[in-house]
Image (cartoon, coloured by chain):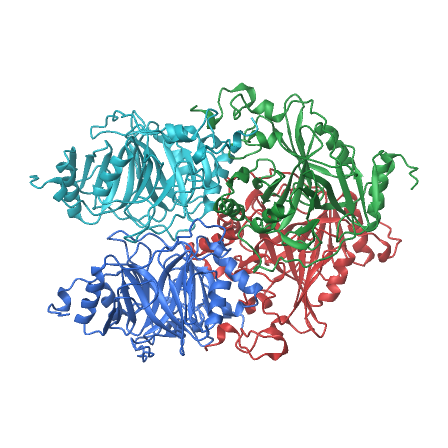
Chain colours: A green, B red, C blue, D cyan
């Protein structure tokens, strides 16, 4: 392909939404037990190498591929584009930026046709596709619903050292920022970016990267999320609950973070707000607002800031990490006891959990 | 303005979403009591002639104008467009179709700037605007939430005699059909059309028209809708509950229909599904599927089929009605007792409610 | 046993609560599909003749026995008493009233020990037992919960022609009335009576009797009941939904009535109020209050008034019916169209569902 | 009164349920703002010295008295008894045990008649009364419900150094243990005791005492509790959230702990199970079961173990504290970092929150 235009002149692909995550797990049977038996995702198709899973309201082949491999990692963040030609546009747009691209007419995963995978400027494996096999949308199949039914893929969350750079790149690619976390010195700690009409299709969390922070699935109501916790308790698996359930400040959604058998983080998420207007107001949170990440002021556990999954290059090798050089959100908000509750202006108020220690 | 292109060559405006309804009520105080005191909509602004109301997650000036007038009617179905130029496009597009248009740089309602109103080919007063005053999005103001909090405007529903003609026009205008109701003879009884990523921004219900069937607001969860019923019971206003609560077949949403003091119908609605993909599958329901309008098979009351609000022309006069000539959904599904439960193929099964009469 | 005391001198047994229903079904496989596969009741034990089912929070052997038989009917309404001696007291108390009693040291059902069955003064087969096998209380087993999980047996409801007579007998037996429905002429249409701290362990509904009106199971929350409706819709079984879901006026509980394959009526019920104080106020509803049976004013379908299950005598034969001679609630509240919405004082307001016919 | 019988021969009063807490607050206006404006309790009556509050389903005068005083403390834990004579029985029973008693025919609080207050063997001020003013049960007044509506008083929780001694005394007084926390060495850390058909009317928590650990109010559903957290966030009062929301292991209820302006702890609680049978199984939890206090394994914050409110003697003076000599639950379960997650048998698994520190 000849790329004669400068990157700035090239139209980006028209991305519709985040569509699926290609995830390497080290033990397929254990992963199946977690995602299918415990979380209730629907198996569209499976073989000895991979399991293709979808949510109850999905009509495309899958939202998650569990792929057997030696290193637990994210192999691709896949986005659906509006037309077949948008796959061409994606290939050209990234090639023009000097990114490695790989095009496959038959797709990289079952059920998906012509696609391109790229290593993006931040080091993440991104995929763009239009062609996909339709399967039954199970929205009306209430006989299949569990108390914690996952009905949609909502978003990805990526760890990258330099959030402003990452944000600029994603805005060029057509994403819009809905919310972010900053401080008075102008440091950006995280940003949320969308294509579909929700708060995000992906978010950037400041930290050593590139890494996958988490993938998020939606439920209909808050009690569905609580019932997942209850079930994990009944299965004596409460250890996999890392943070929450709680109400986010950012996004206003109700949330839960759990960890799969390989340590991949999954968020269960419900009830953010409509963002589809062109001038949808961006919400900026102060990093010292203790309600930014949990509206109820409950603490963010350190592991949530520090742990994340490697991502792979197009050859399947883990990407090396680049260190974050800006202040870390954990460093500026968490004290010596690991749980400090800080406020802007140095107000002398210890974290409520640690008050009596 | 010179319109040199043929209608087919003109690009339609890029409509973002249904944005607000301009509704004439005969008693402003009574209407305020209903929409503000009972339903809890937020007053953005009000004077002796009109009240501007919004939902809790809205950031534009209003989703509903209650305007004092002699005849209870819908004065405008207003859509937001993506850019200021899309208002021009709307004006040209309708003018090219011979529709009457009226442009006002200062808008037809407070808080709205440059807008065009048209009498569309079906006789409905449609408005298109981009410029609008931003107000506080109250999403995080849980101190203002009531048990039945209305968080978003979801859709309009319009009565028109010839659904296929109306559908073709709206598809030309850029809407996409997500679901419809048909029979084996090819009669279309209703169609649901969307711009934003939900099942609809508006729907066409077959009947004498043009009339407003209802306007729908969203809650977060199903219990919010139940609590509205409970409150109406406590206020000894249960008479205003016309149909539901129930689960729709079409849209898969949970619903309730109530009637305001002028008889205008309001739907309270929650939890339909994401429709934003370009090839989102259209769902066609058989008119004889008794779960199409209520998934639990509960009856559609006759008034729901027959009653609706007049709409006004651009001079404020009620539009004359054109009769539906196709079969009516009520006629083919409701028997002599007013509640028959019919099935395709004439299966001999009376409506369950009437079985024992 | 010698009964030397007059009935009035005998202390009634100390009844703890309604405990289980012994129910004859004509097709055990179909009944199992309904109660186990659809409703999710837990099988404690089963054989070719009977299935013993319990709710998730129950620790006694069963709350429902499905017993194969030629005629669909209720074989026994079983109550737990406080001590083994209360079984003696029950036997004596009914014998003193000339009722037929039958004592079995090994019980009438698996899992139950020493019990007495009686044909009570109203013709109902009542059982009293203390001794019962304990089984695992599954309250914490959230891995077994379904979206519509039934967690407790709540109450029975019995049809009897003369409600005041029935009420007096049950009060003598130690029940307390919590609510009733009357009219200005002093006719009593229904009464709710309790032993445990809820609105009722049983209720009397005026009509030809003795018959079983329904048995009610509790869920934790209202959405659990809605999900049962959703599942019935998905299974294309919406016909079994007879009435509701809705909010009761009487009891303030959220409810749903469904019918099993034999036509036995089951209520799903949640969130009535605490009634355990000795002077708990009795609530009397006017039969012409249209919110008494549905707080939202939705109609009571005629079948709900007219249909009920036979009950058996101690030999297993259906009890003959005695006609109600007082006014029937249906007759005074439902008009010629089958759905009239009546009000005290003859206010001219048709039932809202029928308004437009 | 002559007490000729030995304590063991005296029948204890027949206690119906926990009925109200008499609570001293140091700033009545601030307390009113918290309990009325934020939590939505209903004011039955108020003056400059005290505010009488009740829950929505209550029919007795109050469930909580806020009384202005110099020291924030609990002045009385009041129980309703079954008959007027049970007040006599209470007086005699405690007097026979050498406890100080004070009888007032006009009651110690408005709305309450003949009562006795005692300093019980554990040093707590207990009140017993039958006579009480009835007020409107607001259960059906959904126009008054807030999203976090408190519908019932559920229980008290008391801190006492020697749980087995306290338990024995309360069993003698007629309470039954439903659950407890022990270890292999036979130490009892806490016990739950009931009169009404729920898991408890009061509980004993091991620690320096006598102190009030908390008072608990019920909501109907779990989302009601979440909405209280959301509202506290909106009011920027998230600091008052001490622990939760979460699911208890003990009681299986959903819970939240908050602190009032004086530091008094309030639990919001919903959905424990029926315990009314005479042989209701007692559940014993191992102190090293990390799901005992939070079924999801979330940590108990140290303040929850260490902080509690003083209680007053019958002269209104704070009771001196007696130290707990048994192991403290916090000491055996919380590690050096303040949040260790311990397991029986020394399994090497750090507390999940602290893993990455």
Name, please, the residue furthest toward the front: D345
Q: Position of residue C67 (x, y in %)?
A: 40, 71
Between B188 and D212, the one lying in front of the other is D212
C155 with respect to B309 (left or right): left
Place residue B84 in its image quadrant: top right
Instruction: Please state the horizontal and vertical placement of residue B345, each as a whole percent of the image.
Output: 63, 78
Residue at 68% x, 28% y is: A208
Q: Which part of the image, by quadrant, shows the C terminus of chain D?
A: top right
Drawn side of residue B135 relative to residue C216, left or right: right
Q: Is residue C271 left or right of residue B25?
A: left
Asked if residue B49 is positioned above or below residue C159 in the image, the reply reads above
Q: Quadrant of the N terminus of chain D?
A: top left
Is residue C219 placed above or below B352 in the rendered structure? Answer: above
Instruction: Say which of A28 and C169 sits in front.
Output: A28
Q: In x, y percent, where is residue B60?
A: 64, 42
**Looking at the picture, does residue C287 appear above or below residue B117?**
below
Res C284 seen here: no
- The reply, left or right, for residue D117 in relation to residue B131 is left
């Amino acid at each position: 392909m000849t790329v004669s235009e400068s990157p700035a002149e090239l139209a980006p692909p028209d991305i519709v939404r985040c569509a699926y995550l290609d995830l390497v797990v080290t033990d397929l049977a254990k992963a199946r037990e977690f995602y299918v038996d415990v979380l209730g995702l629907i198996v569209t198709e499976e073989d000895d190498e991979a399991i293709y899973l979808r949510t109850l309201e999905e009509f495309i082949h899958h939202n998650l591929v569990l792929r057997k491999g030696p290193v637990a990692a994210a192999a691709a963040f896949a986005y659906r584009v509006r037309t077949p030609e948008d796959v061409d546009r994606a290939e050209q747009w990234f090639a023009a930026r000097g990114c490695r691209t790989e095009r496959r007419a038959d797709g990289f995963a079952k059920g998906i046709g012509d696609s391109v995978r790229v290593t993006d400027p931040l080091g993440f494996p991104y995929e763009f596709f239009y062609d996909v096999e339709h399967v039954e949308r199970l929205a009306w199949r209430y006989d299949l619903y569990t108390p914690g039914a996952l009905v949609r893929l909502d978003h990805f969350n990526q760890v990258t050292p330099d959030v402003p750079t990452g944000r600029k790149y994603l805005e060029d690619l057509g994403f819009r920022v809905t919310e972010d976390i900053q401080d008075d010195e102008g440091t950006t700690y995280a940003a949320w970016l969308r294509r579909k009409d929700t708060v995000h299709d992906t978010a950037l969390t400041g930290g050593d990267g590139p890494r996958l922070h988490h993938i998020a699935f939606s439920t209909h109501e808050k009690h569905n999320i609580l019932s997942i916790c209850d079930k994990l308790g009944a299965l004596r698996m409460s250890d996999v609950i890392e943070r929450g359930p709680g109400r986010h400040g950012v996004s206003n959604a109700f949330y839960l973070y759990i960890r799969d058998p390989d340590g991949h983080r999954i968020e269960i998420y419900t009830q953010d707000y409509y963002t589809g207007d062109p001038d949808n107001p961006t919400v900026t949170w102060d990093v010292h607002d203790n309600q930014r990440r949990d509206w109820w002021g409950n603490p963010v556990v350190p592991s949530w800031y520090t742990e994340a999954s490697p991502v792979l290059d197009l050859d399947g090798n883990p990407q090396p990490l680049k260190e974050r050089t800006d202040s870390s959100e954990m460093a500026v908000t968490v004290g010596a006891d690991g749980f400090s509750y800080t406020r802007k202006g140095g107000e002398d108020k210890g974290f409520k959990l640690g008050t009596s220690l």
